[in-house]
Amino acid sequence: MTLSLDSKCLHLEEDTEDSCNRDLKNYGAVSFPIYQTATYAHPGPGESTGFDYSRLQNPTREQVEKLVAQLEKGIDCIALSSGMAAITILFEIFEPGNHIIVDSDLYGGSIRLFDHVSKKNGLKITRANFSKDDIEVLITPETKALYIETPTNPMMNVSDIKKLSEISKRHSILLIVDNTFLSPYFQNPLELGADIVVHSGTKFLCGHNDTLAGFVVTNRTDIQEKLRFLIKTTGAGLAPFDSWLLLRGIKTLALRMEKSAESALKIAKWLKAQKSVVNVIYPGLEDHPGYKILKEQARGFGAMVTFEVNDKEKALSVLKKVNLIQYAESLGGVDTLITYPETQTHADVPLELRRKNGIKESTLRVSVGIENADDLIADLQQALED
Ligand SMILES: *Cc1c(COP(=O)(O)O)cnc(C)c1O
């Protein structure tokens, strides 16, 4: 049957076609089983159960891949062992000499991958601010793809996916969107014209800060074929137990995203009124330059709030003083985390680029979880006090 978005976090539409079918599948287990097997017996020569070897496919991994493909409205999805594994494998579709234009503000690990691995492999990488610059003039005959995050990590720049997809289609190049920050619950880049979506499944999709995972989703059969070849060939697929943890985590995606985004807005508004806070960057605030575009292309503004305090000393003191909020790398989980991009997520980004992107020694990033918003505010209040 046709399902709404929140129901799609738990069930595959194909599993609800005929309840008898579903009851027979997996002995009627309500929790999808972990198929902890490396290989599969064949009934006879040329006969197969549909599974041969778990590097190619495993039933538990297949289930989570189908679920994420359904949520992102793609025709296929591959599940990898981390977000970085997903981006690394995806970039194997390119050839030496290919040119990729990437957003200048991205997750630090992605910048590190492009600068140190992609370039070594012969790719030419150009950086641009996709929320401001004219991208079309940067396209050359060698250009094969545009690569963005929106909102970006950690500066929350918003770019117009539909407009970029018009450019990419005009030049027959790919538009790749890292949709980690909003998750498919709030934004579906494929629907807006993107060709490929990547995810750090570690974040909102898993939702519990307990597993690493990555996804690549597409709606193009030519890309699908390449991705299936790559997961089979490289062996970076998500393990059965981790696939199961993702299946369990995604069930509550709708509830978690709603609650966290509601609290994030409340916290962003509160931070704006604090005298030791000099800048609050949350795209759900109406004065954010990306507010209008995001309102158009997404169903919510997300749970990430970046803010700047008076100086470095204040930032360090907040990190030391938080009690309920944990000072830790990562985001997207039920537990609220505060991160210091300067020495954590973006430490490997060259200093000059970090400053150019607007990351300062006084910049902090909060991933709002599902604790009570007033408790989180009380914790921030005591942490910001002199
Ligand atoms: C964390 C993150 C990644 C990398 O994912 P891992 O699962 O940590 O490997 C990629 N993109 C964004 C936007 C991220 O936040």
Image (cartoon, helix red, strand yellow):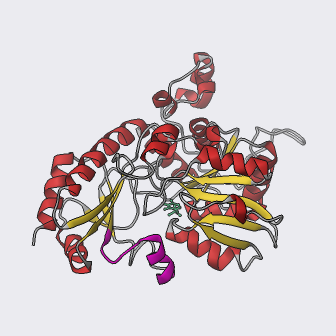
Residue 193 picture location, percent across and down: 67, 42
Looking at the rendered image, the quarter that the C terminus falls into is bottom left
Residue 79 picture location, percent across and down: 62, 51
User: Foreground: 82 or 5?
Assistant: 5
Figure check: 185 above or below 172: above
- Determine whether, in the image, residue 126 is placed left or right of residue 178: right
What residue is rendered at 38% in x and 67% in y?
329
Figure check: 55 above or below 296: below
Residue 319 picture location, percent across and down: 24, 71
**Residue 148 in view in this figure:** yes
Looking at the rendered image, the quarter that the N terminus falls into is top right
User: Foreground: 318 or 351?
Assistant: 351
Reply yes or no: does residue 358 show up in magenta. Answer: yes
User: Foreground: 332 or 363?
Assistant: 363
What residue is rendered at 57% in x and 72% in y?
111
Reply yes or no: does residue 265 show up in magenta. Answer: no
Which span of residues is magenta-colored? 350-363
Q: Quadrant of residue 254?
A: top left
Figure check: 98 above or below 61: below
What residue is rendered at 22% in x and 65% in y?
277
